[in-house]
Structures are given as structure tokens and as C-alpha cells.
């Protein structure tokens, strides 16, 4: 446990997570140094938010002397593990942590943690809704945050023992953690962030850390139909729950589909939760998210009534197969969250109508050939845009040469090209497969710009 009043704390990364850590530590009397490689002009709002706190700012680079006399280095999620301060902290054997680890160490209530390559945000929001529906029946309040929304550390002072916190956790957060939530879930594992982790094995190991520090009384929820995820079942230290479309293994708690219904099995028996046609989310992958959320929330103590209440009326998270508008009888959808080819594949499987696909952004070094072949089957036209467009043209020329396509310099040009190609009855789908960083600060900014451009047509 850190003696805050005697501690020198260095925080690298001045985004939401870094700010929350700085506020928490400074509020408890620590000497806080907040460091970010970005120039001061890009952090004006952040400095204003923390203006009343005794925080020492160092911007523009990462001077190693900041670690002189430091007791701990807190690393924000967007900071790579080869950052100079991180490397120096390792060389000095200085403790390294992050806001999620600190929250897990200090949280006064039960914590549910959710990770995976895809579906984290939707599932986290669903679980939060389900546990909120337990209010007055074992839950005072459900808090949702972590990698989405507000860092939970910022809300911790308001939490009580009867609350439950639901955290979305990325591989970037998990790679530093030495504490696990009492309910831990891995939704799926597919190649992603290999530009950061190097290999699929390293990426999987980071994700699996959500299980590594659980206790025998804890619960783990795994996707039994995803081979890479189910291979981690042997690492579960507590009770194993699972989810999937097919029947549950004998004697195992979790969820499945049966006769057009979502079914839940617990130690108390089996219950039909809701009809599949009551789910208002698009796509098979979202049905998997519902199955996952039901299993996770049940492992955290929610009953079937609460699970049903959480699903009903939920139309999804922004930038995730989000309907934007209908124009000339073509429907436009924003799936800017699709920052890996496999996520774009899931989006393509979600529609049976002809698709005009907007594909591009920045490549993360992932394979694209399978997506090109699928696009040839499910798309009528593809608009390749952004930094990855020339590379994608080569991929499509090799694996989907007959599919009509055009290159566009940026998102705005891509939207206008898609509008020209769209026909009545089409789906026009932004599911880029690449990151947003060639043009935007994050996928949300890209999605917001897409919405704006489409509404201006």
C-alpha cells in the first residue's frame, strides 16, 4: 500500500486515465509529476481541469530524470511498453502500475472485469444495465467505466460496499496488473494490437492476466466457442462459467441458445431469460455479446428478471453498427469501432442486403486477405480510404479482383464516393478495419465526423 503523503508519483500519459490517477494521488498528499510527450497546446483543457491541484507538469518529451526519487510509475493505457520512462523504471526496478490496478486494490465493492478482442463495450454496458436492474435486491448502485466512460478511480470515493463496479479492460491496461476482479470475463481472442504486443502469444498473455490473480471464490466467464479463449479454461482458479450459441457442457453454469431463447443455467437450475427476437442489436456477434452479458451478470448475482431488463430497450453503443440515416432508400451505418479486419468481417455478416463498404484508415499489420474474400461475397462496392488505401488496393487486386472499388484520400472523400455508388436498398457501411490515427485522434472522433458528413449529404 502506498503511503501517499510521503510518495513521489510519476504519471506518464495525460489522458483520462492519467488525469484520474493524478487527481487521486494529489488529493491524498502525494507529490505528483504528470508527463506527456504531447505539446502544451494539445493539453490546455487537461491543465485547466487540474489547475487547482499541486501537479508538476512535464510536456513534450520523457526525461528520465523525472524518475529520480520516484516511488511508483503509473502508466496510462495509450502509453506503449517501450516508452523511455517505462523502460527506465524497469531498469531501476521501480514499481509500475496504472489506474485500473489502483482501483482494484482499493475498491470498496465487488468488481466485474471484461476484456476481449471485440464486443467489450457493448457487453460492459449490458452488464451494467443488468446489475443496475438489481437495485434494491442486493445492489445499491452499479458503476460502469474503465476503458470506456469515466475511469472508475475518479468515482471510487462515492462507492459503497453494496455497490458493484463493471470495468472494461484493454490489453494495454491488463499487461501491468497484478490484481484480478472477482468476476473476470474474456469474450474472444483474435489478432489485434500486434503493433503494440508484437505476437499473438504476447497479446493473449496480456488478456489472460485478468484471470491470473483470481481467488478460489471468484468466477471466470469464457467463450466456449472461441478456441483461443476456451484454451484458457485450465487457468481458471475459481468457478468457471461459459457462454455460447450451442448447448452448455454438462454441469457447467452459463448461457446458451435453445428454441429461439436465451437460456441461463446456474446452481439453482435452468431458466429461459428472453426470446432472441427481443434483442434489438444487429448481428450474430451482438447475440454473442448478449449471451456473454447474461452469463457475466448472473455470475455477479443478477437474476433472470434483471438480465431481461438489461437487454430490453438497449439499442447499442455509439459507433458500433450505429444507424445514422436513410438517404435515397439506402441505410448508412457507423461501425467506426471496427479497427481490425476481423471486426469488419463481423459487421459484414450482420446484413443480408447489398453493402457499399468504406474500408481503410491506418493498418496495424494484421492480415486482410480473408476480409477481401468475404467482401467480394457480401459487398457490391468498396471505397478504400486513408493511409491504408494503396496497400488495400493490392490486397483486393490479389484476392477480390472482380469487386468494384475506388480509392479516396480521406474519410470525407470516401463518404462522397460511397454516396455516388449507393443504390436504393443498399447498406452503406463504415467498418474501416484500420485504426483512425492517420486522420483522427480516436475511433470516436472518426465516427462523429462520419455522422456529420452523412447528415450533410
Image (cartoon, rainbow, N blue to C red):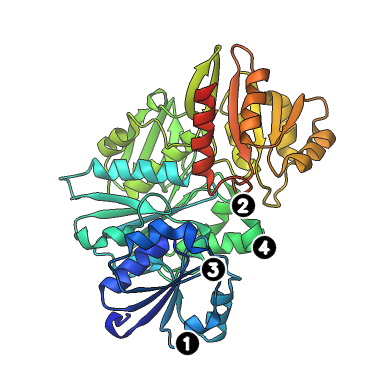
Residue 453 image offset from top left, x and y in percent: 54, 29
Please indicate whether residue 211 sits to the left or right of residue 4 in the image. Answer: right
Spatial CA span between label 2 and label 1 = 35 Å
Q: Whole-percent x and y of residue 309?
A: 28, 34
- In the displayed structure, 11 sits above or below 45; it is below
- Is the residue under label 4 in contact with that under label 2 (CB below 8 Å)? no
Give the mark nearer the N terminus: 2 vs 1. 1
**Between discs 1 and 4, the one toward the N terminus:** 1
Of residues 99 and 309, the one nearer the viewer is 99
Point 74% across, 35% down: residue: 372
> Does label 1 or label 3 sit earlier along the sequence?
3
Nearest the camera: 419 or 93? Answer: 419
Q: Nearer the viewer, mark 1 or mark 3?
A: 3
Q: Compute the Cα span from label 2 to label 4.
A: 10 Å
392 relative to 218, above or below: above
Q: Quadrant of residue 83?
A: bottom right
The CA distance from mark 2 to mark 3 is 29 Å
Foreground tag (1 vs 4): 1
Q: Which residue is mark 1?
A: 68
The residue where tag 4 is placed is: 198
Residues packed near mark 1 inside 10 Å, few (<14), some (14 to 19) or many (20 plus): few
Q: Secondary structure at mark 1?
A: loop
Q: Which residue is mark 2?
A: 192
Of badges 2 and 1, nearer the viewer stands 1
Q: CA distance from mark 4 to mark 3?
A: 26 Å
Helix, strand or loop status at disc 3 = loop
Amino acid at each position: 500500500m502506498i503511503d501517499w503523503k510521503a510518495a513521489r508519483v510519476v504519471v506518464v500519459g495525460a489522458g483520462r486515465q492519467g488525469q484520474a490517477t493524478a487527481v487521486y494521488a494529489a488529493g491524498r498528499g502525494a507529490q505528483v509529476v504528470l508527463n506527456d510527450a504531447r505539446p502544451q497546446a494539445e493539453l490546455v483543457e487537461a491543465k485547466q481541469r487540474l489547475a487547482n491541484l499541486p501537479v508538476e507538469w512535464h510536456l513534450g518529451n520523457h526525461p528520465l530524470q523525472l524518475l529520480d526519487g520516484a516511488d511508483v510509475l503509473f502508466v496510462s493505457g495509450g502509453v506503449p511498453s517501450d516508452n523511455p520512462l517505462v523502460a527506465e523504471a524497469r531498469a531501476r526496478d521501480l514499481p509500475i502500475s496504472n489506474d485500473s490496478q489502483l482501483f482494484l486494490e482499493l475498491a470498496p465493492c465487488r468488481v466485474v472485469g471484461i476484456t476481449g478482442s471485440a464486443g467489450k463495450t457493448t457487453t460492459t454496458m449490458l452488464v451494467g444495465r443488468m446489475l443496475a436492474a438489481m437495485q434494491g435486491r442486493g445492489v445499491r448502485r452499479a458503476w460502469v467505466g474503465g476503458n470506456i466512460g469515466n475511469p472508475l478511480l475518479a468515482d471510487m470515493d462515492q462507492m459503497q460496499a453494496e455497490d458493484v463496479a463493471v470495468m472494461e479492460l484493454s490489453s494495454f491496461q491488463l499487461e501491468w496488473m497484478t490484481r484480478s476482479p472477482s468476476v473476470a470475463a474474456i469474450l474472444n481472442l483474435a489478432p489485434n494490437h500486434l503493433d503494440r504486443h508484437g505476437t499473438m502469444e504476447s497479446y493473449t498473455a496480456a488478456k489472460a492476466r485478468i484471470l491470473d490473480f483470481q481467488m478460489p471464490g471468484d468466477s471466470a466467464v469464457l467463450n466456449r466457442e472461441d478456441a483461443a479463449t476456451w484454451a484458457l479454461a485450465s487457468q481458471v482458479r475459481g468457478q468457471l462459467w461459459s457462454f455460447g450459441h450451442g448447448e452448455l457442457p454438462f454441469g457447467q453454469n452459463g448461457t446458451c441458445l435453445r428454441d429461439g431463447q436465451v437460456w441461463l443455467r446456474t446452481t439453482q437450475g435452468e431458466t429461459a431469460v428472453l426470446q432472441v427476437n427481443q434483442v434489438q442489436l444487429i448481428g450474430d456477434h451482438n447475440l454473442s455479446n448478449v449471451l456473454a452479458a447474461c452469463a457475466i451478470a448472473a455470475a455477479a448475482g443478477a437474476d433472470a428478471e434483471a438480465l431481461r431488463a438489461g437487454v430490453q430497450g438497449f439499442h447499442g453503443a455509439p459507433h458500433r453498427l450505429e444507424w445514422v440515416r436513410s438517404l435515397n432508400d439506402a441505410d448508412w451505418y457507423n461501425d467506426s469501432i471496427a479497427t481490425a479486419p476481423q471486426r469488419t468481417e463481423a459487421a459484414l455478416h450482420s446484413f443480408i442486403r447489398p453493402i457499399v463498404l468504406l474500408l481503410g484508415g491506418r493498418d496495424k499489420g494484421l492480415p486482410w486477405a480473408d476480409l477481401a474474400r468475404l467482401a467480394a461475397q457480401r459487398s457490391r462496392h468498396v471505397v478504400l480510404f486513408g493511409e491504408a488505401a494503396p496497400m488495400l488496393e493490392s490486397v483486393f487486386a490479389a484476392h477480390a479482383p472482380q469487386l468494384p472499388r475506388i480509392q479516396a484520400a480521406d474519410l470525407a472523400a470516401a463518404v462522397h464516393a460511397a454516396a455516388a455508388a449507393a443504390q436504393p436498398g443498399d447498406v452503406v457501411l463504415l467498418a474501416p478495419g484500420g485504426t483512425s490515427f492517420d486522420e483522427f485522434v480516436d475511433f470516436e472522433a472518426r465516427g462523429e465526423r462520419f455522422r456529420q458528413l452523412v447528415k450533410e449529404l
